[in-house]
Amino acid sequence: MLFCPVAFFVIKSVPYTAIGLSAAIIGFTALALSTSRPKISVETSFLLFETGMKNIEAVINELELHEKAIYLPPSENTNKIQVVIPLNNKLSLTELKTAVGGKLFVRNFDNNEIIGVLVHSPSTLAIEKLDNKIEPTAEELENILTHILAGVFDLGDSVHVDIRSNTVNVEVGHPELQIEEMRHYESIGSPVASIVAAVVCKAMEKPVRIRSETNKKRRSHIFLDVLD
């Protein structure tokens, strides 16, 4: 919480102040979802979730981020999947793998230059409880994604996975989460695509990027690139 006044009064940066406020709001949202007694209604949960998504949208717009996010698998430094939005298209995987990640910015290891922004996507929180290793097979991915999307979050009723070399195509039947189209979907993907990307990233143990996402006839088609 100290970041907001420091950003506004000391650094005098509106973008950093917006980031601090957004992080605080998302944090309070997560706290409300995890500690409320009795359990809050589906409608209230949806409202809080949508508010968090809109704050992520505001941060990305304020910082004028346009590149597609890269989902990074757990490493020696962190046991969580990280979602990084590069500041420009010149960022290499080698540079990203050796970068130093903080709570918000990713910096170049050699010169400490900011090269990306860390985003706490709902997907990374959704799969934190998947402690077991996921086998990088189509069958295993279908089972895990069906369990998460259909069984836990009720975001779809079926999943089909097709793996071809460094491309993973995922089809989700009847995606149910109806949130207005947001610009940051072009970067980190929709909530369903983001969950898919995070699971594939964990299974492949390689960086993953959402190439495209289309919705047609109540089916969501998500195309992922597995990066080497």
Image: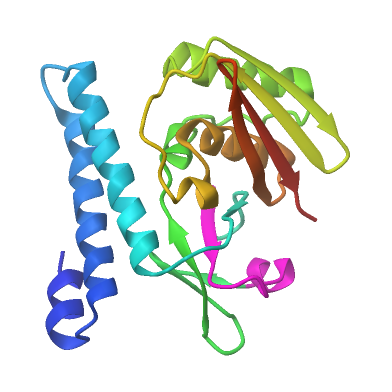
For the N terminus, the quadrant is: bottom left
Relative to 101, residue 220 above or below: above
Residue at the spot 19% in from the left edge and 50% down from the top edge: 25
In-image side of 37 versus 143 (left or right): left
Q: Is residue 94 above or below residue 9?
A: above
Instruction: Left or right? Give the position of 137 relative to 187.
Output: right
- Asked whether 85 or 125 is in front, the reply is 85
Q: x and y percent of residue 119 in the render?
A: 43, 55
Residue 50 x, y percent position in the rendering: 28, 36
Indicate the quadrant containing the C terminus: top left, top right, bottom left or bottom right: bottom right
Residue at the bottom extreme of this rendering: 111
- Residue at 23% from the left image edge and 26% from the top image edge: 45
Q: Which residues are magenta?
A: 81-98
Q: Residue at x 53, y 61 (%)?
A: 85
Q: Is residue 78 visible?
A: no
Numbered label tally: 0
Q: Would residue 91 be visible to someone looking at this image?
A: yes
Percent from the top left, x then y, of residue 149?
51, 20
Q: In this image, 202 relative to 162: left or right?
A: left
User: Compared to 86, does 46 lie above or below?
Assistant: above
